[in-house]
Amino acid sequence: MKFLIIIPAHNEEKNISQCLESLKNQSFRDFVCVIVNDGSTDKTQNIVEDLLIQTSNFKLLNLEESEHQPGAKVVRTFNEGLDSEDWKSFDVVCKYDADIVFPRNYLEKINQVFESNPKAGIVSGLVYIRNYKQNPEIKNLRNPNENWADFSNKNHDWVFENLSSKNHVRGPIKAYKKECFEDMNGLRAVLGWDNLDILLAKKNNWEVVTIKELWVKHLRPTAYKYRSQKAEKLGQYFYNIGLSLPLTMISSAKSSFKNRSAKEFFTTIKSFLKQKDKRYLSKEEIKFIRDLRWKEFFGNFF
């Protein structure tokens, strides 16, 4: 299979060289990688240009900086990269983040799943972050002599980023079979796009696969800038994926109970109720998502 990898990047000078080196050294070679530089003001462009001299299957697309909108921004940047290539001539479309380091066999393992399972629509490994709790002294520090290609993890310096189930394909490492991507009608430029795509893949009878023994290094914790706005963003997310008010109340209650915060519940509901934008979903898609959520809810009791 032939892969098209799109990497949106904005001010990633601290991370992108490790990311691109790990892709350059992949055992699977049949891919084209487009780095979409979204108006970076640091050395991101220079770092990528240095790599382009060394290899022919990496490309750089420079854009003016786009409007900053969580979720929507990264998808719009991704779409610019997608439109720069004849993406339908590829078998697999990948949206990868610029702060990910991949093991040498990563693409090879992803390709094996797509080759062996015709119903696999979205595939990834797992996302690991530095084990700050066990090793607080390494927080925000970079060892200049660190071997980024070493995934033995002998000292448990890297641990699973426990934001969702290990069965969930995370936003930083999405790989879509072309036919699944087409059935989903691409990615929706909204907060929560990386859960919405899973739901839309399931609607079109595609399987979502995570390879549990395959993991990547995530150099920054996810959405670290927005943690203080979590409840408000959660309300927006529930609206974007088409939930009704009762389903939103159930989901908000579960989240607030988990975080032991009654305030979070009311903030989330308030945020949900004030959303007025048109949803990027058809009536059929909204019905499927709501029916699936109700099925999952009642399945907990039977």
Image (cartoon, rainbow, N blue to C red):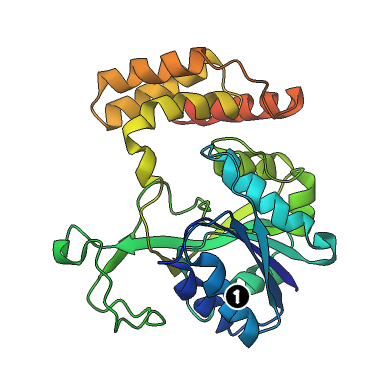
Q: Is residue 103 above or below residue 82?
A: below
Quadrant where the N terminus sits is bottom right
* Observer able to see residue 301: no
Residue type at mark 1 is Glu
Pick whichever, 291 or 76, lies toward us. Answer: 76
Pick whichever, 41 or 86, lies toward us. Answer: 41
* Observer able to see residue 212: yes
Q: Position of residue 290 (x, y in %)?
A: 61, 24
Q: Secondary structure at mark 1?
A: helix
Q: Is residue 117 above or below residue 254?
A: below
Rendered residue at 34%/38% (across/down): 227
**Count of all numbered marks drawn on residues in the image:** 1
Q: Is residue 23 above or below residue 275?
A: below
Q: Is residue 265 left or right of residue 50?
A: left
Q: Position of residue 281 (x, y in %)?
A: 71, 29
Pick whichever, 269 or 7, lies toward us. Answer: 7
Image quadrant assignment for residue 83: bottom right
Mark 1 — residue?
49
Rendered residue at 35%/46% (across/down): 224
Q: Position of residue 241 (x, y in %)?
A: 59, 30
Rendered residue at 50%/20% (across/down): 247
Q: Position of residue 165 (x, y in %)?
A: 43, 48
Rendered residue at 35%/51% (across/down): 162
